[in-house]
Image (spheres, rainbow, N blue to C red):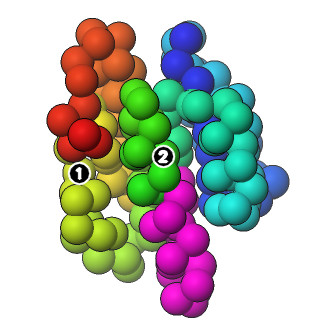
Amino acid sequence: MMTVLVAGVAAGPELEALRACVHSGPHFRIVAHAHDPDIALAQARVLLPDIAVITLHRPDAQAERERLTLVRTLRSFDPPTGIILRRDPHEPTEPISPGLAPVQGAIHAVRRADLDALHHALVAIGRRRASCNIDPAAH
C-alpha cells in the first residue's frame, strides 16, 4: 500500500476529485491532506508518506518558499517521498528549483486538471518504490 499526502488543496470539490482519483487504484490511500504547507510538513514528518501530491500556486514569494521547503524536506526523507507537482495551465513547466527537475518514478509535474496524468504518476512512483530502486536524485 502506497501512502499519499495531499498538500495545497482546501477541502471541497477539488480535494474530493483528487481523493477519488487516488483511491481508484487499490494500492494508493490518502493518509492526510492539508492546504497549508507548514501543516503538510508536520504531517509528513510523522507519517513519512510514500507519495506527496502538491498543488502549486504562486500567489506570493512567502508561499513559494514554503512550498519549496516542503518539497525539499519530503525529498530528504529516507527513502525520499515521491513528488507529484500539480500546476495550473499558465504556470511554466521548468523545475521549481535546481535539483527538483522531473525524474521518472520520483518527481512528476502534471497539469492540475489532468487526473489521468496524476494516476500515471502515482503508478510510476509506486513501481519505483515497489522495486526498491533507490531514488538517485535524493541522495
Rendered view: 27 above or below 54: above
Q: Residue 49: image x %, image y %?
A: 57, 31
Residue at x 48% of width, y 46% of height: 74
Residue at mark 1:
102
Q: Position of residue 43 (x, y in %)?
A: 71, 43
Disc 2 from disc 1: Cα separation: 15 Å
Nearer to me, 93 or 61: 61
Range covered by the magenta-colored residues: 54-70
- Report the amino acid beneath label 1: Pro
Work out whether residue 104 or residue 48 is closer to the camera in this orientation and state it: 48
Q: Assign a secondary structure to mark 1.
A: loop
Q: Which quadrant of the figure contains the N terminus? A: top right
Callout 2: SS = helix
Mark 2, residue position: 74
How dense is the environment of label 2, judged by Cα within 10 Å: few (below 14), some, or many (20 and up)? many
The answer, for residue 23, to whether it is visible in the render is: no
Residue 12 vertical placement versus 20 (above, below):
below
The image position of residue 127, as x and y in percent, is 31, 17
Instruction: Check disc 2 and give the amino acid type.
Output: Leu
